[in-house]
Image (spheres, rainbow, N blue to C red):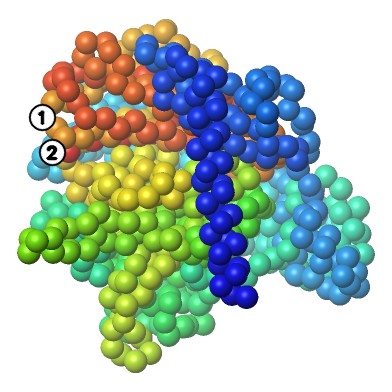
C-alpha cells in the first residue's frame, strides 16, 4: 500500500510538471513576440486562471490573464469573493461532533494604523575590503550623521508603535466586553497582554457561533489550531562563510537572534551559556532546538540568542521583548524552524507577515519537509515579508577517469516547494540542510541530520552577520531580504519552483556591492511621484538607479524587495491579485540596450541576473504596476552585486 501511495504521489507531481510545461508552451504560442514570459496559475473562485507577465525588447512590460481554455479575459471578469471567516477544516471537524470542543485559532480584526508622514532615501557601497560608504541625497555622510538619521528613524517607528499599541489594546478591550463566555476571557486576556493578533481557545460549535455573533465585525478568521512540526563545517564553506570572510565581515556582534521551537535548549550545554543566551521559558529539550541553536552559533558566533517555546513570536506587551532583556542585544532576526502543512494563507501567516511589517524585524522560516508528499510551504512560512529557506544537498566529489569532479548541489526531494494560495514564490532561497554533522545531545556524540530546520538557521545566521556590518539592515527587513536575494549566487540543481533564486552565499555580500533604499509613509501615487522627482531621471514615472559594472565580472545580480501588509493580503487572498503593492524592475546596459526584466505579480520582490558584456554605468529602472493598498507604507530596498 505504501509503495502504491508513493507511486501515486510521483505520478501526480509528474503530471503537474508536464501540465506547467504545456501551459507555458500554449501561452508562448499566443504571444510570439513576447520576451521573458512568466506564468503563474492560480485557483480563484473555484476556477483556474493563468496570470502572465512579459516584456518586449525595450523593457515595456505587459500583463495578460487567460482562463482554463487559454482565452484572454480581463481582471474584472474574474469573480470576486470574500475570504471565508470559518475555514472548511473547522466545519468538517464540527460536522463529526458539534458538541466536542475544538482547539481554534481566532484571528482578530484591528483598525489600520498609518505610518507618520516621512520621507527617506539612502544608498551605500561596499568595496573589496568590506568598507561601506553611505550617501544620503547624493552626499557622503559620516558615522555620526548616520547615527542621527537612525535615531530619527527610530523616533518615527516608536511613534507608530505607540499608536498601534493603543489601537490594538482598545480592540482587545472591546472584544472582551462583547464576549459572554467566561471560559474564553482568560485566552483573550493573555493574547491582549502579550500584544498578539490572534488567540487560541477550545470551544464547541455553538460557542464559536456565539462568539462570532457577539463580536460581529471583529473576527477575520476561525481556523483549527495546529501544533507546529519541527521539521557543519562543510556547509559553512558551501555558503561562503569561512574564517577569511569572518575577518572581512561581521560575526553577529550586537545582534539578537530569537529562535522559537516547541521547546528551548538548556543553558551550559557546551554551546550556550548565560553570557550568550537567554530563554523566555523553563521548558527545555534535548535535541532539535539544541541542534538549531548550534547552527545559529556556528554561523553567527558573536550574536546573542533568545528562545521561547510554543513556536511563538516575541511578546510586545507589557514589555517589548524585541528591545532585549537586561541590557542584552535587541532582537533583530527571528528563526522559525517549523511549519504546518497547509496551502492556505491563514490568520497565523497573516500575523507573522504583519509582525514583520509592524516591528521591522527580519524573519527566516524553514520551508518544511513535505516535498515528497503534499509539498506545501505552509504556515507561517508562506508569509510574503519573510525569507523562506529550502534544503539542498551539497555537491559531492566523484572521480571521473581518476580525476576528482565536484557535482552541483542538488535540491533535496523532501524540501517543500508548493506555493500557497496567494501565489507567491516559496521558498525564495535555499541553503545546506542535508546530512549535516551535528552534535547528538542525547548520546553526547555526533550524527548526520537533514531538514529545512537546519537550512533556515544557516540563513538567519548569515543575516545577523550582515547586520553587524550594515546597520541599516537591523530595522529594514525589506532591504535585508533584497540583500539575501542578491546573494544567491550559488547554483543549485532543481526547478525554480523548488530552489527559488538559488543558494545563499555570504561572501557575495562583500564584493562590489551597492544598496539603495526609498521610504515614504504611504504607497500613494503622489508619494511615488515625489520619489521619482528626486531621482537621476526625474519625473519619468520610474525610480531610477545607476550602477557601475565591469565586464570582467562573471555575474551580476540585482534584487528589489518591498514591505507589504499581511492584513491586506489576508483580506484579498481570494482576489485576482492578493498583493497590495506590485513593482517591476528592468536593467539596461551603458548603450541603453535591455539586459533583463523581472515582473512576477504575486511576489513582493523582483530579481534580475545577467553576465555583464559591457563595462560602464547600468541603469536600474523600478516601475509601479499597482499601488492598490494606499494604507501601506512604501518601503523599497535594492541590492546589486557583481562577483568575479
Tell whether label 2 touches label 1 (CB within 8 Å): yes
In this rendering, the answer to whether 228 lies above or below 456 is: below
Position in image of residue 98 (x %, y %): 90, 69
Q: Is residue 170 left or right of residue 592?
A: right
Q: What residue lies at 32% left-to-right and 50% top-to-bottom? A: 493
Q: Which residue is drawn at 34% across and 47% down?
A: 502
- Residue 190 is labelled as none
Q: What element carries label 2?
A: loop
Q: Is residue 192 above or below residue 595?
A: below
Q: Residue 8, percent across and down?
A: 60, 62
Residue wearing tag 1: 552
Q: In which quarter of the image is the N terminus?
A: bottom right
Q: Where is residue 323 in the image (x, y as percent from the top left)?
A: 44, 57
> Looking at the image, which residue is at 19% across and 26% down?
612
Residue at position x 55%, y 19% in the image: 30
Outermost residue toward the top in this view:
539
Amino acid at each position: 500500500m505504501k509503495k502504491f501511495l508513493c507511486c501515486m504521489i510521483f505520478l501526480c507531481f509528474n503530471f503537474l510538471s508536464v501540465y506547467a510545461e504545456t501551459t507555458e508552451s500554449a501561452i508562448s504560442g499566443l504571444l510570439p513576440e513576447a520576451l521573458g514570459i512568466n506564468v503563474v496559475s492560480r485557483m480563484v473562485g473555484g476556477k483556474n486562471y493563468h496570470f502572465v507577465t512579459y516584456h518586449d525588447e525595450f523593457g515595456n512590460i505587459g500583463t495578460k490573464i487567460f482562463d482554463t481554455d487559454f482565452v484572454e479575459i480581463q481582471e474584472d471578469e474574474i469573480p470576486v469573493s470574500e475570504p471565508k471567516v470559518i475555514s472548511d477544516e473547522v466545519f468538517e471537524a464540527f460536522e463529526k461532533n458539534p458538541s466536542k470542543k475544538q482547539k481554534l485559532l481566532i484571528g482578530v480584526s484591528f483598525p489600520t494604523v498609518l505610518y507618520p508622514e516621512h520621507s527617506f532615501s539612502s544608498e551605500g557601497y561596499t568595496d573589496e575590503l568590506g568598507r561601506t560608504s553611505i550617501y544620503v541625497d547624493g552626499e557622503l555622510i559620516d558615522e555620526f550623521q548616520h547615527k542621527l538619521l537612525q535615531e530619527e528613524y527610530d523616533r518615527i517607528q516608536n511613534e507608530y508603535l505607540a499608536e498601534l499599541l493603543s489601537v490594538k489594546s482598545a480592540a482587545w478591550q472591546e472584544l472582551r466586553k462583547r464576549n459572554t463566555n467566561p471560559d474564553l476571557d482568560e485566552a483573550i486576556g493573555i493574547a491582549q497582554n502579550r500584544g498578539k493578533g490572534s488567540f487560541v481557545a477550545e470551544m464547541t460549535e455553538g460557542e464559536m457561533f456565539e462568539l462570532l455573533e457577539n463580536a460581529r465585525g471583529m473576527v477575520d478568521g476561525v481556523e483549527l489550531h495546529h501544533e507546529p512540526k519541527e521539521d557543519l563545517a562543510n556547509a559553512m564553506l558551501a555558503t561562503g562563510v569561512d574564517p577569511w570572510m569572518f575577518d572581512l565581515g561581521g560575526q553577529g556582534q550586537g545582534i539578537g537572534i530569537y529562535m522559537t521551537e516547541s521547546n528551548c535548549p538548556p543553558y551550559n550545554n557546551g554551546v550556550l551559556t548565560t553570557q550568550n543566551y537567554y530563554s523566555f521559558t523553563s521548558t527545555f529539550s534535548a535535541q532539535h532546538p539544541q541542534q538549531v541553536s548550534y547552527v545559529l552559533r556556528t554561523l553567527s558566533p558573536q550574536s546573542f540568542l533568545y528562545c521561547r517555546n510554543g513556536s511563538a513570536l516575541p511578546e510586545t506587551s507589557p514589555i517589548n521583548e524585541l528591545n532585549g532583556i537586561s541590557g542584552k542585544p535587541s532582537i533583530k532576526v527571528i528563526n522559525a524552524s517549523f511549519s504546518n502543512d497547509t496551502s492556505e494563507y491563514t490568520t497565523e501567516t497573516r500575523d507573522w507577515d504583519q509582525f514583520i511589517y509592524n516591528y521591522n524585524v527580519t524573519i527566516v522560516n524553514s520551508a518544511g519537509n513535505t516535498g515528497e508528499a503534499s509539498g506545501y510551504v505552509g504556515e507561517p512560512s508562506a508569509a510574503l515579508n519573510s525569507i523562506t529557506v529550502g534544503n539542498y544537498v551539497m555537491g559531492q566529489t566523484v572521480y571521473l577517469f581518476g580525476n576528482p569532479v565536484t557535482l552541483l548541489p542538488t535540491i533535496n526531494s523532501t524540501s517543500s516547494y508548493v506555493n500557497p494560495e496567494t501565489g507567491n514564490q516559496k521558498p525564495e532561497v535555499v541553503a545546506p540542510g542535508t546530512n549535516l554533522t551535528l552534535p547528538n545531545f542525547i548520546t553526547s556524540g555526533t550524527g548526520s541530520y537533514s531538514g529545512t530546520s537546519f537550512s533556515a538557521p544557516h540563513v538567519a545566521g548569515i543575516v545577523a552577520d550582515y547586520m553587524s556590518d550594515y546597520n541599516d539592515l537591523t530595522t529594514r527587513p525589506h532591504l535585508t531580504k533584497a540583500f539575501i536575494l542578491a546573494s544567491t549566487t550559488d547554483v543549485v540543481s532543481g526547478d525554480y519552483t523548488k530552489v527559488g533564486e538559488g543558494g545563499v552565499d555570504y561572501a557575495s555580500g562583500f564584493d562590489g556591492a551597492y544598496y539603495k533604499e526609498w521610504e515614504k509613509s504611504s504607497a500613494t501615487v503622489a508619494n511615488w511621484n515625489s520619489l521619482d522627482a528626486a531621482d537621476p531621471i526625474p519625473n519619468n514615472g520610474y525610480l531610477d538607479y545607476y550602477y557601475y559594472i565591469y565586464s570582467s565580472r562573471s555575474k551580476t545580480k540585482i534584487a528589489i524587495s518591498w514591505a507589504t501588509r499581511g492584513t491586506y493580503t489576508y483580506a484579498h487572498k481570494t482576489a485576482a491579485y492578493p498583493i497590495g503593492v506590485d513593482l517591476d524592475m528592468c536593467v539596461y546596459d551603458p548603450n541603453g540596450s535591455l539586459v533583463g526584466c523581472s515582473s512576477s505579480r504575486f511576489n513582493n520582490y523582483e530579481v534580475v541576473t545577467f553576465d555583464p558584456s559591457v563595462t560602464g554605468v547600468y541603469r536600474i529602472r523600478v516601475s509601479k504596476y499597482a499601488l492598490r493598498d494606499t494604507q501601506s507604507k512604501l518601503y523599497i530596498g535594492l541590492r546589486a552585486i557583481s562577483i568575479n
